[in-house]
Image (cartoon, rainbow, N blue to C red):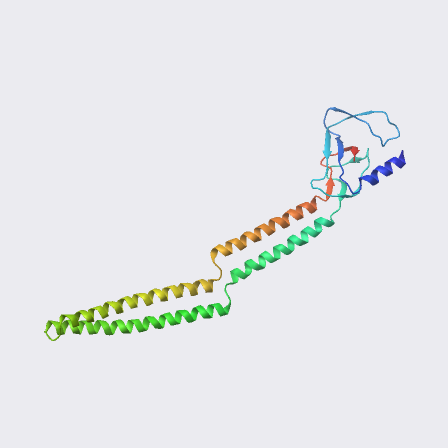
Amino acid sequence: MLESKTKKEKTIIGVAAVFLIIGIAGGGWWWYHSAQLVNTDDARITGTIVSVSPKIPGRISEVLVKEGAQVKAGQVLAKMDARDTLVQRKQAEAALSVAKANYDQMIAGSRPQEIEQASAIVEQAQAGVEQARASLTNAEKNYERMVTLYAEGAISASQRDSAEAAYLMAKEGMNATRQATHGASQKLSLTVAGSREEAIRAAAGQVKQAEAALEATNLANEYMNIVSPVEGIIALKG
């Protein structure tokens, strides 16, 4: 019968292990029959039956208890093969590193070349504003002079109207260059600030997902040890 026991324990290695533990405390009767014992008579034991099995799929690498053994709460009953879990944890750690690097790059902002280019566009727009301001000043003065000359009868109405049209056009040109400068300044601000807020939020979300994946692998690694939740006696394993 001892040979049978050794053979059965070997077959347990590499497959799933399920333990039935009869709690020392508690009520109720449970009948069981053990083929591992020399005495094959049924035995009757008092206690609460607790089934213990792996929390995650995997292979059992080592069984640490035998049938009939008394165990304490928290005692390790068996160990699972943790090689796959360790590989998954390394992969999760690598994915988290990549996600954090991407997020840090977005937070750091744009490259110096991009900022320099945006600054040059702002300078050009500001120069355009100065030119438009000078044109507007000249057109306004000319229009005022034409209004005076028309009042004196020195010029015709069409000459006055032409001066007025030139003044209005210069005014519109001034507004257009101001808007262009405002747009260029906004673009420069965004470039200096770095990536858009939406992209930064997305990168932060990827970091959180990678952290959750790593946490899951760490939890799976904790489940590599199958422990007894109660104090009791091993009634069946297999």
Relative to 157, 226 lies left or right: right
Closest to the observer: 12 or 69? 12
Residue at the limit of the structure toward the bottom, as seen here: 154
Closest to the observer: 29 or 220? 220
The C terminus sits in image quarter: top right
Task: Indicate the position of residue 75 as horizontal and vertical percent values.
Answer: 75, 40
Question: In the rendered view, would you say 174 is above or below 3?
Answer: below
Closest to the observer: 203 or 234? 203
User: Residue, x 74% and y 50% (percent of image)?
Assistant: 83
Task: Indicate the position of residue 217 as horizontal and vertical percent values.
Answer: 66, 48
Count all numbered tags in the image, as a single digit.
0
User: Residue, x 70% and y 49% (percent of image)?
Assistant: 85
Question: In the rendered view, would you say 103 is above or below 181?
Answer: above
Quarter residue 13 falls in: top right
Task: Indicate the position of residue 137 as horizontal and vertical percent values.
Answer: 25, 72
Question: In the rendered view, would you say 114 is above or below 84?
Answer: below
Residue at the limit of the structure toward the left, as seen here: 153
User: Residue, x 89% and y 37% (percent of image)?
Assistant: 3
The N terminus sits in image quarter: top right
Relative to 29, 133 lies left or right: left
Task: Indicate the position of residue 221 as horizontal and vertical percent values.
Answer: 70, 47
Quarter residue 117 falls in: bottom left
